[in-house]
Structure formats: C-alpha cells, structure tokens
Amino acid sequence: MTRARTKERDEYNRLARSFHPPRPILRNAVSAFLVGGTICTVAQVILDYLSVRLPKTQALAMTSSLMVFLGAFLTGLGVYDEIGRFAGMGAALPITGFANSVVSPAMEFKREGFVLGVSARMFQVAGPVIVYGSLSALIVSILRVYVFK
Amino acid sequence: MTLLYAFLVGGALCALAQTVVDLTEANPAFVMVSAVSLGAVLSGLGLYGPLADLAGAGATTPLLGFGHSLVTGMLEDVGRFGWFGLFTGGLRATASGLMAAIVFGYLMAVLFNPKG
C-alpha cells in the first residue's frame, strides 16, 4: 500500500512538473552572480576602509558586524526581500542573507510575543546554520589536528 | 584589485549556490547549511585560506566564510590552549557576526513590521 502510494506520488510529481514552466537557470545564476558579487564588493570596500586603522582580524570582524547590520536594516525596511526575490541565493548566501534569515521570521512572529515569538524564531534558519557549521568545523578540526597532522 | 576579485569570487559562489537550488529544487535553508559545512571542509583541506587571501570579502562574506572562520578559530585555539581550543575557538572567531545578528536582528524585529 505504501509502495502504491509512493508510486502515485511520483507520478503526480512528474505530471505536476511537466506543467511548471522550466526554471530560468542561466538568468537566475546571472542575477545571483551580480547581486552576490555587489554585496561582497561593498563588504570589501568596508574592509579596505577599516584595514587602514585596525589589525586584520579586527577589521574582518567589524566588517561582518556591519554587513549583518546592513542586512538586518534592509530587511526591516522590506528592501532585502525584494532583492532576494530577484537574486535568490545571491542575496541569501552572503552574511547579509544570514541577517535576513534572522530578522524575517522574528518580525513575522512578533504577534506571538517577545520570548516565544521574536527571540525563539530569530534562529529558525540561523540556528541550523550555526549547529551544522559548528559540528562540521569540529569534525574537520579534529581531523586536521589528530589525524592528518 | 582585491575589489575585482571580491566581486568575481563572491558572485561566482552565489551563482553556484543558485544553480544548485535550481537543479536540485532544494530548500534555500538546506543550501545555506550545506554552504557553511562545505566552507569548513574546504578550510580543512587548506583551500579556503588562499581563496580568502585572493578575494578578501568575496570569500569571507558568503556563508562558506563562516565555516572557514569556525575552523580557523578552532585550529588557532588548539595551537594556543591544546585540545580544549576545539570548544572555544569556533565561536570566538565568529563572535562578531553572531553578536551582531542577535543585537541588530532583535532590534530590527522590534522596530519594524513585516510589509504586505
């Protein structure tokens, strides 16, 4: 019975897909390239400016904070979601998109209160990013330190 | 010159991620998670450091750079404090981004309301 259902679902998915317009893969890649590249260039301009008066690690750290601020602010204004609709991963992959993934659900769920709404939902996407990032970095570092010295 | 490389490398990483989303129809959240892990792996292989030297913010701004910072921080702290550096280095190196996400994320969510 499960097998029949899976088969039905597969058939349905195939049928449904044939009615979808094909994804404009090349155009999407170009918009992602242009917007993602521009965001990184903005970050580089900030980094160059800060590097004049700060040590490298400080300048890098402050740049990411500033980019997070920019992403969060533009999300609050409703601008970043417009950029995201156009650029897809070009807006989501830079750290400004990480900020966007924090602010969007937090804003959305404000009506559920400031603890279970705003602060709990802030990490709806950012949480998994932090969890899997930390775990994979841990494994990689263990391999680097103890296995492939 | 770094400006140009930042544009090209940052743009290329985003275009690649977008193509993965389009071809696999994966949820962007899954791609973000994979990007961080991929950044950590590339960092461990010693590939992401040179890319960051070449492209600056073009390599550190995309989420792969987050994975790279986690690994670099852990390795640095292991060098300084021994094995327990594995537990202190990652979040130390990424503290500025995370703290900014908490502070500005909270602030903007309180100040603004969703549009439409």
Image (cartoon, rainbow, N blue to C red):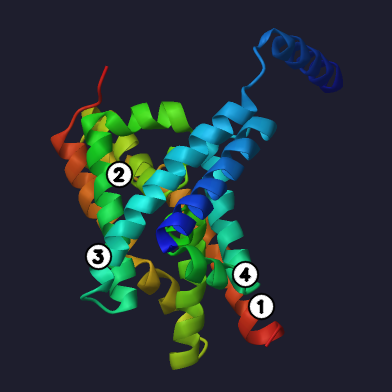
Q: Gap in Å between the C-alphas at discs 4 and 3? A: 26 Å
Q: Residues within 10 Å of mark 3 (few under 14, many from 20)?
A: few
Q: Gap in Å between the C-alphas at discs 1 and 2? A: 34 Å
**Vertical placement of residue B69 versus A147, above or below:** above
Chain at numbered mark 3 = A
The answer to whether residue A89 of the structure is visible from this angle is no
**Which residue matches tag 4?**
B47
- Percent position (x, y) of residue A42? 33, 51
| Kind of residue at disc 1 | Leu
**Which residue matches tag 3?**
A49
First of labels 3, 2 by sequence position = 3
Secondary structure under badge 1? helix
Q: Is residue A24 left or right of residue B57?
A: right
Label 1 or label 2, whichever lies nearer to me, is: 2
Label 3 or label 2, whichever lies nearer to me, is: 3
Label 2 or label 4, whichever lies nearer to me, is: 4
The answer to whether residue A108 of the structure is visible from this angle is yes
Q: Gap in Å between the C-alphas at discs 4 and 1? A: 15 Å
Q: Is residue A11 left or right of residue B7?
A: right
